[in-house]
């Protein structure tokens, strides 16, 4: 009892100075609200620590901490990365590797071909380059260009060029897309000085490189030749073309007209080019097979040349009505007549080039030295062709 009394007296003596202090600030109430959570967390940590120490004493082995688990995980990841660095793209399944190569543009595909022999054999395959040929060159490359390429490959004079010029063309193509420091030339390990890579001369990749670098001149047709000269408006002429990869345009060489020298035109955009729709040389008469199907309002192209020494050009026109027809569709019989009227509405109504008449039954080259000579006719059947001609329509009517 005496001991209890002494303890109480000591407690009150110790508490008195504290009670006499200033009142607690306003945030003291908030601390009281937070404190249960604080002491709860403190208690949980204390129990956990106590339990861990007891567990260590009982089994003499440490409990892994979160930091040790993180360290172990990072170590395993680093080991996985080191293992993956030893893998090669050739370790991929064939189907996966083919899918990757099919997605590559032409220039990266060329770089892949210079890595090793195995990748080269895959990257030069025609099935990979067929899509690139159609996507970029399909609109301007026709049967005539394909024959010209075959002759170019088979010609004996180009044998050395095809053998030693391949790498130059490939590097020129790649240099348009990457810095020079990225490019490498592969040499045989036996140090013979010859290139270890080999590209078949008649492969699609070789043809693509020849087109892309401008080394190969191919036949095609040009709308409104010679920069839209007034004498060639709404016409399309054959020419030899070479691509300029720096400007993404073409250079054209037109065949000579009589005594006139070869005409050269630069900076031709893609929109003014097309592959020849029919396989008829520019100096030959096209055999028309649509004369009996022509009706007023049909859109056509007709061959025309200034004189017998000139090559033909294709000119855009529309089938018109005969003079005795008033244009009423209910009474029009122009399609059953032996004569066909062709109108060229880019010229004024009083121009001698505005209208001409040809025979439907026995059509051959017709005309004279003053007005020129009209040749074969082809009917335009697609809206794309018609729209393209209309987009080239001159801003002013021609005389």
Image (tube, rainbow, N blue to C red):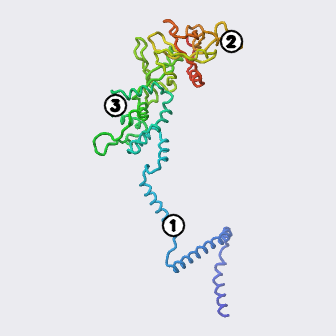
Residue shown at 52% from the left, 70% from the top: 65
Toward the viewer: 116 or 261? 116
Q: Which numbered circle lies on residue 161?
A: 3
Q: Report x, y in % for residue 207.
A: 42, 32
- Alpha carbon of mark 1 to alpha carbon of mark 3: how far? 64 Å
Check whether the beta carbons of the residues at disc 1 and disc 2 lie within 8 A of each other.
no
Q: Is residue 366 left or right of residue 216?
A: right
Q: Earlier in the sequence, mark 1 or mark 2?
A: 1
Q: Residues within 10 Å of mark 2 (few under 14, many from 20)?
A: some
- Alpha carbon of mark 3 to alpha carbon of mark 2: how far? 62 Å
Q: Which numbered circle lies on residue 332?
A: 2
Q: Quadrant of the N terminus?
A: bottom right
Check whether the beta carbons of the residues at disc 3 and disc 2 lie within 8 A of each other.
no
- Alpha carbon of mark 1 to alpha carbon of mark 2: how far? 93 Å
Q: Residues within 10 Å of mark 1 (few under 14, many from 20)?
A: few
When the figure is inspected, residue 214 is found, relative to residue 302, above or below; the finding is: below
Residue shown at 47% from the left, 15% from the top: 284
């Amino acid at each position: 009892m005496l001991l209890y009394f002494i303890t109480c007296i000591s407690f009150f003596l110790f508490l008195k100075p504290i009670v006499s202090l200033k009142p607690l600030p306003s945030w003291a109430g908030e601390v009281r609200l937070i404190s249960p959570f604080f002491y709860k967390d403190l208690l949980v940590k204390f129990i956990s620590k106590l339990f861990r120490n007891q567990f260590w004493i009982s089994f003499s082995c440490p409990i892994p901490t979160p930091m040790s688990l993180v360290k172990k995980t990072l170590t395993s990841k680093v080991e996985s990365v080191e293992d993956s660095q030893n893998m090669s793209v050739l370790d991929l399944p064939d189907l996966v590797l083919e899918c990757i190569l099919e997605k590559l543009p032409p220039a990266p595909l060329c770089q892949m071909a210079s890595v090793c022999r195995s990748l080269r054999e895959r990257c030069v395959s025609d099935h990979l380059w067929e899509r690139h040929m159609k996507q970029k060159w399909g609109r301007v490359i026709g049967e005539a260009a394909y024959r010209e390429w075959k002759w170019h490959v088979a010609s004996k004079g180009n044998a050395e060029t095809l053998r030693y010029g391949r790498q130059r063309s490939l590097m020129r193509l790649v240099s348009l897309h990457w810095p020079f420091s990225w490019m490498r030339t592969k040499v045989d390990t036996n140090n013979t000085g010859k290139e270890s890579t080999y590209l078949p001369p008649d492969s699609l990749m070789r043809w693509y490189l020849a087109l892309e670098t401008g080394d190969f001149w191919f036949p095609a047709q040009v709308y409104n030749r010679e920069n839209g000269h007034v004498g060639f408006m709404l016409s399309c002429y054959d020419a030899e073309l070479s691509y300029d990869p720096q400007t993404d345009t073409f250079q054209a060489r037109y065949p000579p007209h009589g005594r006139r020298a070869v005409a050269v035109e630069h900076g031709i955009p893609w929109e003014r080019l097309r592959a020849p729709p029919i396989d008829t040389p520019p100096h030959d008469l096209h055999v028309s097979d649509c004369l009996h199907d022509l009706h007023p309002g049909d859109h056509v192209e007709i061959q025309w040349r200034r004189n017998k020494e000139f090559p033909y050009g294709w000119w855009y026109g529309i089938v018109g009505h005969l003079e005795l027809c008033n244009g009423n569709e209910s009474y029009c019989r122009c399609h059953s007549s032996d004569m066909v009227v062709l109108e060229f509405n880019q010229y004024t109504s009083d121009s001698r080039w505005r209208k001409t008449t040809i025979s439907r039954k026995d059509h051959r080259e017709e005309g004279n030295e003053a007005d020129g000579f009209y040749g074969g006719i082809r009917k335009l059947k697609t809206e794309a062709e018609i729209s393209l001609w209309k987009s080239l329509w001159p801003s002013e009517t021609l005389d």
